Image: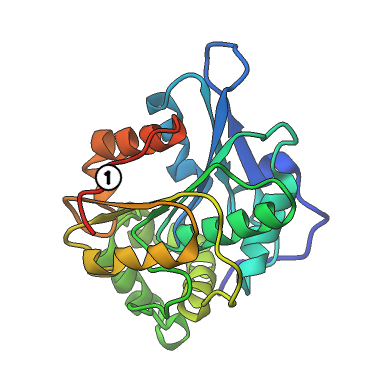
Amino acid sequence: MNPARHPTDHPSPDDVVWVLPGDDGEPPRTSLLVLPHAGGNAHAYAPWRERLPAGVRLLVGQYPGRGARFSEPLPERMADLVDPIVACLPPDTDDLVVLGHSMGSLVAYEVTRALTAAGRAPRALIASACRAPFLPNPSPVHPDTLDDDQLVAAIKERGGTDDGILDEPELRELVLPSIRADFAIDDAYRSAETAPLDCPVAVIGGDADPVVPAAALGRWVDVTRAAVTTHVLPGGHFYFQDQMDDFLSLVTTVVDGATVRPEYA
């Protein structure tokens, strides 16, 4: 039986967007907004703060149904992930780079579209291990057809989730509902036809990713009028876990405003 969830009042902005400034006490020169993968949460990305330059403020999105937002209804469509994040960005977020991993890249794309429409366009978008948003999901999970054990097996095959959580019955009962909800959104999502973005896009992926093959990453070129660079690192769908230094070096280059030299096209 899944844990009961009840509608709540609007969540606190700090619960929707975690704000992790540098420890030097200086005002941030720029902000990096990170949007988690399907089934992911802000806790998984908060440690990046220690590996980013002090002048970069790390913002991490927390989706409904996890953390302090656990009691909220589970998300059913992309807007349930995107709209609260856009609404809860700190008001002083003027210079912004948006990054997503896997499904989070689709969230990041929609957040970038929404901010652009509102006159607050991010300076750049970073898409990690994800298909271009106008393409169908090349590796759908179909969570509605899987029992809990089958879903756990599918998650473990992709990686990125602590197997200890998935192997502990009580913890698994807590996390599987939000994972199911996210995968259902990821399976169904395709972006609406719309004007291309104006900001540059950096695309990063793993050379052995079974979910989004490296050859598919170049399709992001169609989402923007600006430059698109593509970089492939060794590894699978969660390649950055074993390539964190190289990955965050690429991210920092984008945040610093330089152009990442493409190594794959």
Residue 51 drawn at (x, y percent) = 37, 27
Q: Where 244 sits versus 210, above or below?
A: above
The residue positioned 47% from the left and 70% from the top of the image is 133
Tag 1 residue: 241
From this viewpoint, which residue is outermost toward the front?
Answer: 225
Q: Nearer the viewer, residue 181 or 209?
A: 209
Does residue 13 appear to the left or right of 3 in the view shown?
A: right
Q: Residue at x 31, y 73 (%)?
A: 154
Give the camera-side residue of 111 and 139: 111
Colour scheme of the rendered structure: rainbow
Q: Amino acid at mark 1?
A: Gln
The single residue placed furthest to the bottom in the displayed view is: 145
Q: How many numbered callouts?
A: 1
- Foreground pick, 43 / 77: 77
Residue 39 appears anywhere in the view:
no
Q: Is residue 154 left or right of residue 236?
A: right
**Is any atom of residue 125 visible in this view?**
yes
Residue 221 in picture, x, y percent from top left: 39, 63
Tell which residue pokes out farthest to the right in this image.
Answer: 9
Query: In x, y percent, where is residue 173?
Result: 49, 65
Q: Is residue 38 left or right of residue 88?
A: left
Rendered-image quadrant of the C terminus? bottom left
Is label 1 in a helix, a strand or a loop? helix
Frontmost residue, 126 versus 186: 126
Residue 161 image offset from top left, x and y in percent: 35, 55
Q: Is residue 103 above or below residue 119?
A: below
Q: Quadrant of residue 107?
A: bottom right
How crowded pointer 1 is (Cα within 10 Å; few <14, some 14-19, many 20+) is rated as few
Quarter of the image with the N terminus in it? bottom right
